[in-house]
Amino acid sequence: MKKFIILLSLLILLPLTAASKPLIPIMKTLFTDVTGTVPDAEEIAHKAELFRQQTGIAPFIVVLPDINNEASLRQNGKAMLAHASSSLSDVKGSVLLLFTTREPRLIMITNGQVESGLDDKHLGLLIENHTLAYLNADLWYQGINNALAVLQA
């Protein structure tokens, strides 16, 4: 009977794990918009590259519809950043800026090498406070551009 219950539970749970998708799409460039919400994506990617050249920090910017599990995202974010920035040269740190479109907000994760007097969560809130008005008004380009400016300051 135990074997039957274990087999039944595996049959139920196995399709759920196979169908689950990653929390964040694979970051191949500094800017990824899976929603198609942000106009001038090339310009934002260019500004992110300039930010990387000026500061030595690679800003990976991702726009998603929503985030279901923020705790898991924060837990795995540093490993995802390490993998994404491993192909970049002359980078002394990296930061992940996640923007959500359904409920506009910003989540920021650093790889721990970004020099700041604040932890990730508080620095992310500071940047979010300076960009939220743009995001709520659907001014995504301005909001992301402002987030980079605040992060650089």
Image: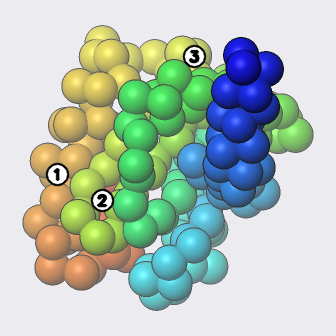
Q: Is residue 148 left or right of residue 5?
A: left
Which label's residue is closer to the chain start, 3 or 1? 3
Residue 16 vs residue 100, the one in the foreground = 16
Q: Where is 12 relative to 27, above or below? A: above
Mark found first going from the N terminus, 1 or 2 = 1
| Crowd tier of the residue under label 1, counting other residues whose Cα lies within 10 Å: few below 14, some 14–19, many 20 or above | some
- The residue that disc 3 covers is 113
Q: Residues within 10 Å of mark 2 (few under 14, many from 20)?
A: some
Residue at 29%, 36% in the rendered image: 124
Which secondary structure, mark 2?
A: helix
Above or below: residue 114 compared with residue 40 = above
Q: Secondary structure at mark 3?
A: loop
Mark 3 vs 2, N-terminal side: 3
**Residue type marked 3:** Gln
Q: Which mark is residue 112?
A: none
Question: Which dot marks residue 130?
Answer: 1
Q: Position of residue 95 (x, y in %)?
A: 53, 36
- Residue drawn at x 61%, y 63% is 31
Give the residue pinned by disc 2: 146
| Kind of residue at disc 1 | His
Residue type marked 2: Asn
